[in-house]
């Protein structure tokens, strides 16, 4: 309603757009002519938000999210436009959204997971609410109405085709769900994404009660475009904001040792089972270090079936190790994005970008027997993993996609350094302070010291294996003493409750 | 090898068989003529077992397992035939197998879950090993070799067809996997199972990388028979053993209140979501009480998609509440079995018996959005569930199928009484001593006092909801004090670690 009668010239009159974005580009980016009157400045789009709205977006911690609209929203809030929103997004987002909203006091509740520092701190102080989401289930919960009505979806795209369908950019993730569920839609077209990304995407909506007909991790079963009721589009905003770069630091010696241990486990597994299933590798320095190390291993024909693709994937592709990557988005730094776009015709054959409802689907993960490699904050001698809360209570990050992968993989590996704080504190503890993954979800634990293959072991065997293979040597005696003391009590699990309360 | 040249007359010469089982019955039960020379007495079959063998079987805690062969094995062991086996079975078994083997010292390790008291005690004393299995993954792990080579599968059947395929009886469960994987096979034909059960079964082997083409919970996608390489059959034994009866006791007042609360939740859920998805209901007195109560509710057209069907299902069918039941076996007492068989033509249209690889499949549970109702030993204010170990260490029962259902349902309910020991001890605790289901797997907690719908709640909200709705009133103050004390510490989860060590 509010947009009716607004003409493109209102925007063309703006100096920046007129000078910097030629009309030809508009035409290419918005192929459905009738939609061109939705072109707005970000400031206009930002005025669409109202206090109490549930706002859904999509993105990774590094890219894929709409910076321009949220930047303008931040400005509006800073100028005293008092409003608070619920921000719904399955993945973690960058500080330009999360922290910006927190600084302005514009965030009532974050639903999904957390990517940025100020938001995390505000949640721990109780100033911002946080509904921790399991990546594969956030969309399902939203669809069932658990988070309330979704008022507006703000989604980055590379363009809109002549049917009014969205041509995604580097991030599909939960965008198809939000575009379907939200009452209103704001599209942010990122001019730094070449339109040649068209065709990389595979958009498919799983239907309750029906098989997802995916019979190979790299097969395409959907459309390259996200369908959209164009009547819901309120604004189309252009963005040329620069992507975030992250300081590259070569992996340390400890990370290299963890990486080597994961690699050795995979080689052994391949030998025993005849082949490696598709891999899922989570995020973080340790796992990036592991991915980088694979360029030097003799594993090849790797298929990745995971949530997000990180920078080292490009090295792996160039080293000839990769058959293909199914993911929901690129979680690339600016330099990796540039590299990807500058050789798009080379890289495109390796990638398929899908909705999170496929990448994190229990149905598909189980079907392909994906082998999952994730990290955590601490592990205990039972084999339980805390991946989210320090001291049982302070949020570090949400469980996010590790929920889906640990539970539905054929082999679930957790890899982490054995200590923190320069070796002063052991990450291998008698009992984790917060359980994100039970013993039932942890098949293999890996640190820089070794590999504890826990499959088909009983609780005391698991404990001893973890202590001997994974704990830092200087903490082993203490942990063994705990186990020996527990052994004198009745029962089959090494745990001392009497000392706890 | 050992069976070659043995003729049926060797068995026919045995008085009991000759007098009690007419030849016509042999012919009906073993339609493949060449297999009739495998007919053996149980004592002969029992001599097949060797020390160290991995023996796989199938069954529920009440029926479906081969009593005759294991009875004879027990006798052999009692007579001094020193041997120990590993017993592999995804489901819990009755005392005629589990306890009998334990009493004779014949069990080295139980793999799967535990159904019987003496076995549980022996495991807790460390005399018998126990590899706790997640029902939906036991077969997968076995297939990957985690439990070693399976030497022999001992499987109950109602007969063998002319192709040498197994006509199952009341239990499919993991039998198709064991018949495929084991080097040798012993079939126990239960003459108390009418051959008219033929056709009730739907045997399908999921294939890695391929969609399971099940698009309705009650659809049939497989064969009524279990395929089998007949060269692996070592013995065919007949059994007429009586089924176990269990003393029926009417549900107590507390169980009725829990049942009413579950029923009320389901009605509300149906109202909100438009329809109820297929239900999974676990085992135990509380859940049996709930099922019984449904005969008096106004819920109808119920579809069950679960592991085992229990006695109250027959009442529900007769009360006209049920559209159909997909399960892997009947966990019926003797009286319910008699009732089922005596009106088989009436009941058969409601049942489809499938392998556990379908009933507990993450792929299928997610696809149908099954609503899961399970029970547990204790719950905590975070919403975590301990369903297996008392005081964190003493085995009560394995996690079994609740693993699959809690993780892959669309709504996961846990229902349990709020106290034990005549109300002296609260089952709602600050922190469970053993975590089988994390907060991520528990959507709704129900006791006789009320319903705590935890969906889209934050940790402190969850804690308060659980205390107010589910804890016994006399324990609420203590739990609230814990929460208030935790609230004074930094962080977002109500937990006191400082007091624990």
Image (cartoon, coloured by chain):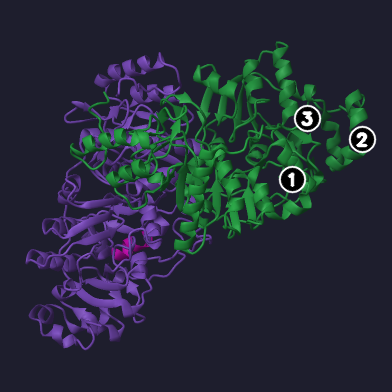
Chain colours: A green, B purple
> Who's the residue at 57% across and 54% down the image?
A297
Confirm whether the magenta stretch covers residue B346. Answer: yes
Choose between B208 and A81: the one closer to the eye.
Answer: B208
The x and y percentages for residue A218 are 63, 56
Q: Which residue is mark 1?
A: A340
The x and y percentages for residue A418 are 43, 36
Compare marks 2 and 3 and give the one earlier in the sequence.
2
* Residue stretch in magenta: B344-353
Choose between B204 and B74: the one closer to the eye.
Answer: B74
Q: Quadrant of the C terminus of chain A?
A: top left
- Principal SS element in the magenta part? helix
Of labels 2 and 3, the one closer to you: 3
Bin the neighbour count of mark 2 within 10 Å (Cα to Cα): few under 14, some 14-19, many 20 and up. few
Compare marks 3 and 1 and give the one earlier in the sequence.
3
The answer to whether dots 3 and 1 both sit on one chain is yes
Confirm whether the magenta stretch covers residue A244. Answer: no
> Who's the residue at 10% across and 66% down the image?
B75
> Mark 2 falls within which chain?
A
What's the distance in space between the residues labelled 2 and 3, CA to CA?
A: 17 Å
The reply, left or right, for residue A160 in relation to residue A50 is right
- CB of mark 3 within 8 Å of CB of mark 1? no
The x and y percentages for residue B444 are 40, 34
Q: Which residue is mark 3?
A: A241
Of labels 1 and 2, the one closer to you: 1
């Amino acid at each position: 309603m509010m947009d009716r009668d607004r003409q493109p010239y209102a925007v063309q009159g703006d100096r920046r757009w007129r000078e910097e974005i030629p009309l030809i580009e508009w035409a290419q980016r918005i192929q459905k002519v009738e939609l061109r009157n939705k072109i707005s400045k970000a400031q206009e789009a930002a005025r669409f938000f109202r206090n109490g709205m549930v706002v859904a977006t999509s993105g990774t911690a590094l890219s894929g999210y709409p910076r321009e609209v949220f930047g303008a929203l931040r400005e509006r809030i800073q100028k005293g436009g008092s409003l608070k929103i619920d921000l719904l997004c399955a993945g973690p987002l960058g500080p330009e959204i999360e922290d910006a909203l927190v600084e302005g006091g514009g965030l009532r509740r974050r639903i999904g997971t957390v990517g940025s520092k100020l938001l995390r701190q505000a949640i721990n102080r109780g100033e911002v609410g946080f509904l921790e989401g399991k990546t594969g289930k956030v969309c399902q919960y939203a669809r069932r109405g658990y988070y309330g009505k979704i008022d507006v979806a703000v989604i980055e795209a590379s363009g809109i085709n002549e049917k009014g369908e969205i041509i995604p950019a580097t991030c599909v993730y939960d965008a198809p769900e939000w575009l379907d569920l939200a009452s209103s839609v704001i599209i942010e077209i990122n001019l730094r994404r070449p339109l040649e990304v068209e065709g990389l995407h595979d958009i498919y909506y799983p239907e309750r009660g029906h098989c997802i007909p995916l019979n190979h991790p790299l097969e395409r079963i959907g459309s390259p475009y996200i369908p959209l009721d164009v009547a819901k589009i309120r604004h189309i905003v252009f963005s040329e904001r620069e992507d975030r770069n992250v300081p590259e630091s070569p992996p340390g010696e400890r990370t290299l040792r963890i990486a080597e241990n994961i690699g050795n486990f995979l080689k052994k597994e391949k030998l025993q089972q005849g082949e490696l299933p598709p891999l899922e590798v989570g995020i973080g320095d340790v796992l990036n270090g592991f991915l980088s190390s694979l360029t030097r291993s003799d594993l090849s024909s790797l298929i990745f079936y995971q949530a997000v693709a990180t920078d080292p994937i490009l090295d792996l592709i160039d080293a000839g190790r990769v058959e293909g990557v199914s993911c929901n988005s690129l979680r690339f730094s600016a330099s990796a994005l540039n590299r990807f776009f500058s050789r798009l015709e080379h890289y495109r054959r390796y990638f398929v970008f899908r909705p999170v409802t496929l990448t994190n689907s229990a149905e598909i993960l189980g079907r392909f027997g994906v082998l999952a490699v994730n990290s955590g904050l601490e592990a205990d001698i039972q084999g339980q993993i805390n991946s989210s809360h320090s001291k049982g209570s302070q949020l570090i990050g949400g469980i996010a996609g590790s929920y889906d992968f640990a539970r539905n993989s054929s082999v679930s590996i957790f890899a982490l350094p054995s200590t923190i704080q320069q070796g002063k504190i052991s990450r291998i503890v008698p009992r984790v302070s917060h359980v994100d993954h039970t013993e039932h979800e942890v098949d293999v634990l890996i640190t820089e010291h070794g590999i504890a293959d826990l499959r088909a072991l009983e609780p005391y065997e698991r404990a001893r294996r973890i202590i001997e293979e994974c704990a830092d040597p200087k903490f082993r005696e203490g942990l063994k003493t705990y186990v020996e003391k527990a052994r004198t009590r009745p029962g089959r699990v090494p745990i001392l409750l009497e000392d706890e309360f």
